[in-house]
Image: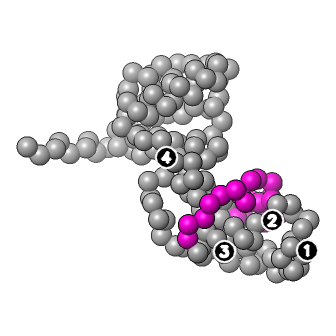
Amino acid sequence: MGTTPEPVGATRSGRTSLGEVACRYRADEIRLEDLPMIAAEALAAGLDTPTLCELAGLPRHADTREIRDAFEQALSEAGIELPDRGLARRHALRRLAARLIAGEIAAGDLATDDWWETEAETAEERSFLSLIQHCACCTENTLGLDRQTWTAELRSAALTLTSSPPTDPAC
């Protein structure tokens, strides 16, 4: 007996967007208080589970444990697995590189996060991460590069990373 194909349309797009939210949540890119609105948007996109409805009805200032538990239960009900934190951070690194290329963030802004803790698995990830400094003032001392050269090399590494295929497109 064959399996029934997954429905196409709003439910699929709701599931896909909720899967991306799960990845961003795991990479600490989503604030817990934003999850009820995100759940409401997933419902509007056609994804419907009991806990997703419950989550959409929670206020932004609800207990964070309640929001977290409801979100993770809603993912489970929708058949969406919460990704490994390392994988989620690697996908976040790609999004960061894309934002740098698009000019949404400056090179110096990259030093404000804990990217040095990310475990790179590809040469492209390692190259980009090696150029991200712990603090914006240390570029010349640690890399031996002036700010202009560092920015150019960082942008080049970001372009290489975003052009390479993701090792796991799940996020």
Q: CA distance from mark 1 to mark 3?
A: 18 Å
Instruction: Assign a secondary structure to mark 4.
Output: loop
Is 119 in front, or is 17? 119
* Residue at left offset 57%, top offset 31%: 35
Q: Residues within 10 Å of mark 1 (few under 14, many from 20)?
A: few
Q: CA distance from mark 4 to mark 3?
A: 24 Å
> Farthest residue in the left direction?
1
Image: magenta residue range:
100-122
111 in relation to 23, above or below: below
104 in relation to 71, above or below: below
**Residue 92 colored magenta?**
no
Residue 133, numbered label: 2
Residue 83, numbered label: 4
Q: Label 3 belongs to which residue?
A: 127
Residue 141, numbered label: 1
Q: Amino acid at mark 1?
A: Asn
Residue 25 in view of the camera? yes
Q: Amino acid at mark 4?
A: Pro
Instruction: Assign a secondary structure to mark 1.
Output: helix
